[in-house]
Each structure stands twice: as C-alpha cells, then as structure tokens.
Image (cartoon, helix red, strand yellow):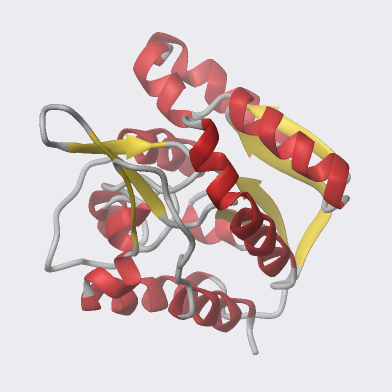
C-alpha cells in the first residue's frame, strides 16, 4: 500500500467509542459527511501516492471548521480548493490556523513539495467540542479538562502508534503548541515513541495574537523544518 492508501484506511476506520465528560462530544467527519471521505481520499491520493517516509508534525486535535469538515489536518475548504486543487461542494469553511499553515506551506515551496516531506495529524485525530451555557458548541482541546484527558489518553497513544506505522520518521517530531508539547512529553517519556521533540508556536496563537510578526514565525517554522 502507498503512504496515502494507509492514511485513507486509518481514517476510514477511525472511531472513538470511549467515554467523555459531560458537555463534551467528538465529531467524526468521516461518519458525518459522505463528501468528507471523498475529498480526504482525493487529497491523500494526490499528495501521498508513493512509498516515501515523512516527518511528523503533531497538532492538538482537529478544528470543527478545518479537518472537522475536510478530513485533512489544518485544511479548511478554502485552502483545500485554492492550495490543493480539491473542491468541496457540501461545505464552505474558514479556519484561522489553516491560513497560517498554508502561508507557511507556500513559503516552503507549495503543497506538493511540503507534503512530499511532511505528514500532519494529531494525537487525538477527531474534533472535540464543548457545549457552553449559551447552548452552542465550541472547539475544545484534549487537555482543556483533566477528566477529558483521562478519557482520551489511551486512544491518543494508540493513534500515535498507528500514525508511526504509516512510515514516519520518529527521530525528530515537530509539536505545535507549548501546552500540547508538555502533555506529549509526558506520554513520550513513558511510551518512548519519538526522539527529539521540536516545539513550535501553534498556528492559531500566531494568527490570533502575533499576526504582525507572522513572517518571523513563518521563518521560524522554515528553519525548524530545515528549509532555511
């Protein structure tokens, strides 16, 4: 199987059947929207139709407007169409983190070059939302609640092991988000999954709080990913 076919198989079989604390829920785009499976498969057939290994970039968990819709990490429907050439008919989303990631990918040399070297996913590869007092659901991170992390930790470890089995280079991984890195370090100290863990600021943090310094952060990413 090609790298891409392995990813598609992983996603097709992705289900979370564990418990969750009150007010939290898991979104599985591969079950919720038939077109998600279609565009996800098109993406991995286009950019991962080979047997090359990749370096691993590790997010937190998908956004409900990014991979929670497209099935492709850090990729909203706008970037999926404009940068990757894959149009999604059933949804139209804009996701803040996706803007930074694809600006960085463009600086790297474009989607084809970037995805030939890197694979992005998350230790908890499905979107998590939290029900607020106002009756709406907002994005949640796996580490936002101690009970939540306790519920999903074993699933995260198994997911990371399955990602590694796709053919990833584990000598150095790139972790997005300082708090994410702290939790992953504890897991890695116990499970010995990765060698060096290089920590980068999370794209959402950069877009939301450091947008004036965006080019500096893009340079920081490129240096870390050995492109400069």
Foreground residue among 221 and 91: 91
Q: Quadrant of residue 90?
A: bottom left
The quadrant of the picture occupied by the N terminus is: bottom right
Residue 44 image point, x, y percent: 48, 73
Residue 176 image point, x, y percent: 59, 34
Residue 137 in the figure: left or right of residue 195:
left
Residue at image location 48% in from the left, 72% down from the top: 14
Residue at image location 61% in from the left, 46% down from the top: 58
Residue 146 image point, x, y percent: 54, 32
Residue at image location 42% in from the left, 50% down from the top: 20
Q: Quadrant of residue 180?
A: top right
Foreground residue among 27 and 7: 27
Residue 67 in the figure: left or right of residue 3:
left
- Figure check: 224 above or below 207: below
Foreground residue among 23 and 163: 23
Q: In this view of the protein, can residue 226 be seen by the observer?
A: no
- Figure check: 32 above or below 55: below
Residue 174 in the figure: left or right of residue 134:
right
Residue 115 image point, x, y percent: 57, 59
- Figure check: 54 above or below 57: below
């Amino acid at each position: 199987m090609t790298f891409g076919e392995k990813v598609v198989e992983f996603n097709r079989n992705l289900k979370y059947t564990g418990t969750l604390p009150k007010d939290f829920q898991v979104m599985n785009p591969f079950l919720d929207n038939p077109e998600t499976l279609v565009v996800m498969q098109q993406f991995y057939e286009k950019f991962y139709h080979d047997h090359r290994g990749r370096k691993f970039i590790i997010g937190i968990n998908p956004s409900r407007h990014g991979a929670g819709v497209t099935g492709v990490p850090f990729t909203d429907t706008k970037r999926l169409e404009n940068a990757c050439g894959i149009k999604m008919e059933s949804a139209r989303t804009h996701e803040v983190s996706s803007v930074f990631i694809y600006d960085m990918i463009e600086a790297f040399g474009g989607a084809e070059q970037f995805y030939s070297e890197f694979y992005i996913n998350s230790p908890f590869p499905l979107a998590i939302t939290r029900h607020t007092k106002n009756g709406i659901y907002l994005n949640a991170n796996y580490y936002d609640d101690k009970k939540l992390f306790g519920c999903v930790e074993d699933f995260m470890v198994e997911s990371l092991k399955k990602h590694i089995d796709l053919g990833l280079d584990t000598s150095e991984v790139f972790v997005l988000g300082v708090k994410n890195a702290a939790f992953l370090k504890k897991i890695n100290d116990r499970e010995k999954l990765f060698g060096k863990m290089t920590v980068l600021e999370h794209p959402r943090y950069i877009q939301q709080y450091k947008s004036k310094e965006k080019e500096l952060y893009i340079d920081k990413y490129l240096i870390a990913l050995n492109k400069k």
